[in-house]
Image (spheres, helix red, strand yellow):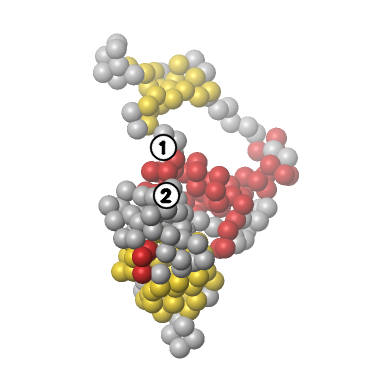
Amino acid sequence: MAILKGGVDGPISGLVGTVICYHMDGVTYMRGKITPRAEDSWSDKQVIHRKRVSRVAALWKSLANNPVRSTWRASSKPWPGYSLFLKTNLAAFNADGSQVDLEYLHLSAGSLPLPHQLQASGSEENPEVWKVSWLNDSGKGQASAIDDLLVMAVRDGKFSDPIITGAKRGDKTASIQLPGGEGTVQGIYLSFVSANRESCSMDQFFGA
């Protein structure tokens, strides 16, 4: 059943015949009604692909309370942020989704550019401290000298919230303390965010 929101002149929401109407960010969308398929109708290849997609979906769900999810929503409008997340990260998982390559995984999205020659390595004396360097490309495109460097740590497959390191794009180097947490550090994800917090870059992974 469809519902008229706001009276006869308002948008339609719900099922109209075989078409589903829904709204997102002030835009009305229509799609065909999906008819569930019997489980035994899926081919082996389709079953494996579904497992892969479900692993990406589980990762997206695990980031529900992580501020990084907002970058995908902002970058994918008017489409759902999950759609862009899935498209970007499906290739990071193997065929059945049982393994993920952290190097190909991205936790943030955006149009702000990463600087060239971004490099990072952990300290042999203290794995919680990392040295980072990059070229200062301030003034090129959206890049600004006051963009903030963000870091996320991954420990035993669990991701920290992004934290502001205190380093700026114009600094070219930084020594950063990783976000606290339990487990062995597998690596870090680095990205930049504009000073007004309206633009973010896609991140880059560096293994421990």
Residue 201: x and y in percent read 43, 54
Residue 133: x and y in percent read 45, 72
For the residue pair 139 and 163, the one nearer the viewer reads as: 139
Residue 190: x and y in percent read 44, 64
Amino acid residing under circle 1:
Lys
Residue 22: x and y in percent read 40, 26
Lower sequence index among marks 2 and 1: 1
Task: Give the side of residue 91 with respect to residue 176, left or right.
Answer: right
Q: Mark 1 points at which residue?
A: 77
Checking the image for residue 141, the label placed there is 2
* Residue in the image at 55% along x and 45% along y: 87
Say whether residue 163 is visible.
Answer: no
Amino acid residing under circle 2:
Gly
Q: How crowded is mark 1: few (under 14 residues within 10 Å), some or many (20 or more)?
A: few
Q: Residue furthest bottom?
A: 125
In the rendered image of this protein, does residue 205 appear above or below residue 107? below
Q: How many marks?
A: 2
Distance between the alpha carbons at the discs numbered 2 and 1: 21 Å
In the rendered image of this protein, does residue 199 appear above or below residue 165? above
Label 1 residue SS: loop
